[in-house]
Amino acid sequence: MSVRLKLFVMMVLEFFIWGAWLPLIFGYLPSLGFSSTEQSLILNAFPIAAIVGMFFSNQFADRNFAAEKFLAFSHLIGGLAILGCAFTREFWPFFLLMLVHCLLYVPTISITNSIAFANMKDAQNEFGIVRMGGTIGWILAAWPFTFILVDWDKVNAANAQGFVAWLGAVLGNGLTGDALKDATKWTYIVSGAASVILALFSLGLPHTPPKKPEAGSQDNLAWLEALKLLKHPFVLVLWVVTFIDAFVHNCYFNWTGAFLGSEKVGIPGNWIMPVMSIGQVAEILTMVILGVTLKKLGWKATMVVGILGHAIRFATYAYLPEYKGLIILVQVVHGICYAFFFATVYIFVDEFFPKDIRSSAQGLFNVMILGVGALVANSVCPYLIQEVFTKNKATDFQSLFLVPCAASVVAAILLALFFNPPAKESFNPHS
């Protein structure tokens, strides 16, 4: 197997692990009887790990361990932890297992990037193809469940003759209700199995030795330097808008799975994850045209389109839930939201900021994208769905979607009015 193919498979497995358990966890936790506070604690294990990773674990792993060995260790222990989540229904064991998994998994996101960059001959031309493996891995994670989350009693009762008829019966009889929630434990089994496979696969990756800090390096204080960038108004505006967009992005994951499976929409349980994966397919296609879009529209307009994509999707959820085909089609917007905003933010930072502070600036926005935005969404969303909707029957479930819809509109207005970066040549981040 060539080095580039190994790196591609590494990325496929890396994001398969995350994509297997995330989409359905938001409906699974209430079925275990966890309170909204307990749900938030479990869901926030990932953003907490992301924040810790930004300030400590990523750098610690980078400098003290060969990357492929750290990857193998993290995915072995982290994989066993997420596997354990399938076999417990008590809060504290579930929370601690999820926390262990996330603390070990999150640093591997940057470690896989480090391995890829260290072992490519032409990173500028090769990395995009290698990293696309991650998106494909997330998509692939959805499809085993079309055959796992199946009501086999109905399939057997159908007594289908021939493979094609049998396959139709399987795909058309997804689990619903309590049976679906109970079977969701399989998402952790599949995720854990993929993690253990990646642990073993990592031992065959090219050796990537630890990076020793340069003499006089102040990287351990880089995050303090990054915070100083917020004195520039356009950086502060983009940082705040990134927080809002990350919050909205995580509202999508919190509520969409339960919404698609609700009586009003009626997506069978084994098709919820594949329907949500349409967004990742669209992401691949959108990334292909992103460069052309940036040249045509510029930074601000491209990001505004990405933000408003959220508003369109949530407005469709709120006002047109009975149109199942439209609800499925609007999942395409997810790819536009990600590529036109988050990917554009990363590209903007990489192109606009000088090399000496580029890494710090990326970390500054990563804290919002993977950390704080998710932390707030995971704290607010379980409360809203459980305490406002479930207990107050007068509150329509779909009306909750107006919260992230309105937030998206506010973020787009803020960006359109106040994000005015100076000419790149005249910008001095240290002034």
Image (cartoon, rainbow, N blue to C red):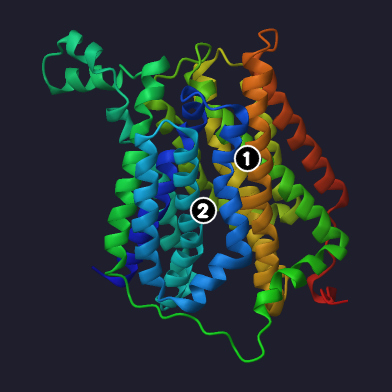
**Could you say where residue 172 lies in the image, as x and y percent from the top left?**
31, 17
Q: Residue furthest bottom?
A: 215
In the displayed structure, 235 sits above or below 242; it is: below
Q: Which residue is mark 1?
A: 249
The residue carrying mark 2 is: 288
Q: Name which quarter of the figure residue 327 lies in.
A: top right
Nearer the observer: mark 2 or 1; the answer is: 1
Disc 2 residue type?
Val
Q: Which x, y percent locates residue 258?
A: 52, 23
Near-viewer residue (205 or 52): 52
Residue ID at (70%, 67%): 361
Q: Residue at x 81, y 73 (%)?
A: 429
Amino acid type, mark 1: His
Q: Is residue 38 left or right of residue 115?
A: right
Q: In which quarter of the view is residue 173 placed?
A: top left
Is 196 displayed left or right of 330 in the figure? left
Closer to the N terminus: mark 2 or mark 1?
1
Q: Position of residue 123 (x, y in %)?
A: 47, 73
Rendered position, 371 above or below 308: below
Mark 2 crowd level (few <14, some 14–19, many ≥20, 10 Å Cα):
few
Residue 411 picture quarter: top right
Residue at the image point whose x is 36% and y is 71% from the top: 69
Taking depth in this image into account, of 329 and 391 the one nearest to the observer is: 391
Image spot of residue 4 (x, y percent): 34, 68
Q: Looking at this view, is 155 or 334 the one in front? A: 155
Residue 259 appears anywhere in the view? yes
Instruction: Kindly identify the residue that appears in the image at 34 percent across and 78 percent down.
Output: 207
